[in-house]
Image (tube, helix red, strand yellow):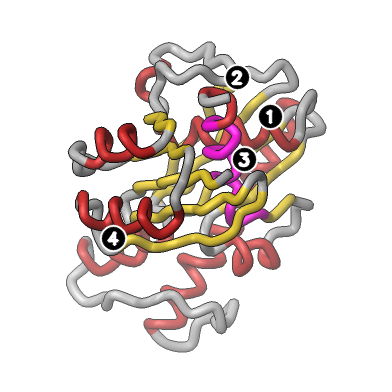
Amino acid sequence: MITLCFDFGNTRLKCAVFNGTALQEIIVLENDSVETIKQLLNQYHAQKSILSSVINHNEAIEPVLASATKFHKLSHLTKLPISSPVGKPETIGADRLALAVAAVYFYPGKNNLVVGIGSAITYNFINKYNQFLGGGISPGMEMRFKALQTFTAKLPLVKKDWNFPLLGYDTRTNILSGVLLGMAKEIDGMIDEYKDKYGNFNAVLTGGDTPHFAPLLKNQIFADSEFLFKGLYAISEYNNA
């Protein structure tokens, strides 16, 4: 059975194709037009679909998905295997809900901290009682690069390059070291803070740049670039069984 899991983030629109429980393919979409969605449906003949969106997407695609598949739109009203004892659960991003569900699905009965690296860095803590307690949000990599250019008179916009030195020798390498190594040290520091408060827990790092950041961390983590999609699949199954 084919399931299409759509993740509409601030940077990219992506679709993961699951064949049963196996992640078969990840597609980067050019847009969220009805035509694009119909092409995917015609190509994969999906039986189920789920949409996680943190942007103002084209809502016309929703009835198209609903007419062709068992469709679910992820929101704070979604039936989930977690609870969210926070002040305003309706403000929790759909992407963070998917990460929390993935943590419960793959590491049940344990405290979990899921760190998502994307347009923003999100810290998502789920305790052993399957309660999503919240966490933190800080600027992501591209945001940091752009901020240095935008809010200074002379600093350039630098593109990521993983071959960077600790000690920068020109403006570009100074920025690379400050942003990339700075992010890694931030993530390590946040993990340490959670350790001081909660003791032992699983730390999961996810997002497209996970393979590059994981080696920079001193803390032991589980690295899974596609953790969000796996959470979306689990939510789809939970709601469309």
- Residue 207 highlighted magenta (yes or no): no
Q: How much space separates mark 3 and mark 2, taking CA atoms?
A: 14 Å
- Find the residue positioned furthest to the bottom: 169
236 and 100: which is toward the camera: 236
Residue that badge 4 annotates = 147
Q: Are marks 2 and 4 in contact (CB under 8 Å)?
A: no
Which percent across, then down, holds residue 226?
A: 58, 53
Q: How much space separates mark 1 and mark 3, taking CA atoms?
A: 11 Å
Residue that badge 2 annotates = 82
Residue 114 badge: 3
Badge 1 or badge 2: first in the primary sequence = 2
Residue 225 badge: none
- State which mark lies toward you, 2 or 4: 2
Local secondary structure at mark 2: loop
- State which mark lies toward you, 1 or 4: 1
Q: How much space separates mark 2 and mark 4, taking CA atoms?
A: 36 Å
Q: Residues within 10 Å of mark 4 (few under 14, many from 20)?
A: some
Answer with left or right where residue 86 lies relative to residue 213.
left
Q: In the rendered structure, which amino acid carries the disc numbered 4? A: Ala
Q: In the rendered structure, which amino acid carries the disc numbered 3? A: Val
Badge 2 or badge 4: first in the primary sequence = 2
Which quadrant: the N terminus? top right
Which quadrant: the C terminus? top right
Answer with left or right where residue 154 lies relative to residue 13.
left
Residue that badge 1 annotates = 104
Q: In the rendered structure, which amino acid carries the disc numbered 1? A: Val
The stretch of residues the image draws in magenta is: 224-236
Badge 1 or badge 4: first in the primary sequence = 1
Which percent across, then down, holds residue 112?
A: 70, 33
